[in-house]
Amino acid sequence: MSKTERRTKQLTTALREGGVRITRQRAVLLDVLAMADDHPDAVELHRRAEQVVPGISLSTVYRTLTALEERGVILRHLFEGAPARFEHAEADHHDHMIDVDTGTVVEFTSEQIEKLQTELAAQHGYDIVHHRMELYVRKKPRTP
Ligand SMILES: [Zn+2]
């Protein structure tokens, strides 16, 4: 089973368990979500789904995303200055860089940062339960 197929199956099961009927429109949206590796927002997901099933409404997209988020199979990111963006929840832990000019989201992981965070929390007598690290970035001007 490919990654996309596995994700689609997971999303479909989650939606069914949430008592949501899998219409053709929703099935297409789940495919679109399973294929997305770029943190699209709801409008972008709607645009992609519409290319396959014209007529899918934006409110169907919003309601489906909310149901999936409640089941814990997708993550909603509220980056500053942008509408909520979504990604499949099965990805390994990573942090995000957000290009403030283009909205491009870059994923990164750093063992050093993870270690440093753990140490910092420990210095204050805490274990980290969860963390979110966002870097807001701008491309360096190209040197001639
Ligand atoms: Zn991500």
Image: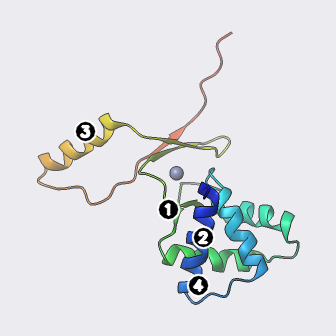
Neighbor class of circle 4 (other Cα within 10 Å; few <14, some 14-19, many 20+) is few
**With respect to residue 60, does 101 lie above or below?**
above
User: How many angstroms separate mark 3 from mark 4 (CA)?
Assistant: 41 Å
Q: Return the x and y of residue 134 as percentages of the image width and height.
A: 45, 47
Question: Mark 2 or mark 4, which is nearer the start of the sequence?
Answer: 2
Specify the farthest residue to the right.
54
Residue on which the image places disc 1 = 89
Q: Do the residues labelled 2 and 3 touch (CB within 8 Å)?
A: no
Mark 4 or 2, which is nearer the eye? Answer: 2
User: How many angstroms separate mark 4 from mark 2 (CA)?
Assistant: 11 Å
Q: Nearer the viewer, residue 11 or 43?
A: 11
Q: Return the x and y of residue 103 as percentages of the image width and height.
A: 64, 46
**With respect to residue 95, does 17 lie above or below?**
below
Answer left or right for 10 relative to 29: left
Answer left or right for 49 relative to 126: right
Residue on which the image places disc 2 = 9
Q: Name the residue at 66% across, 40% down.
A: 101
Q: Name the residue at 67% across, 69% down.
A: 30
Amino acid carrying label 3: it is Leu
What secondary structure is marked by label 2?
helix
Q: Quadrant of residue 47?
A: bottom right
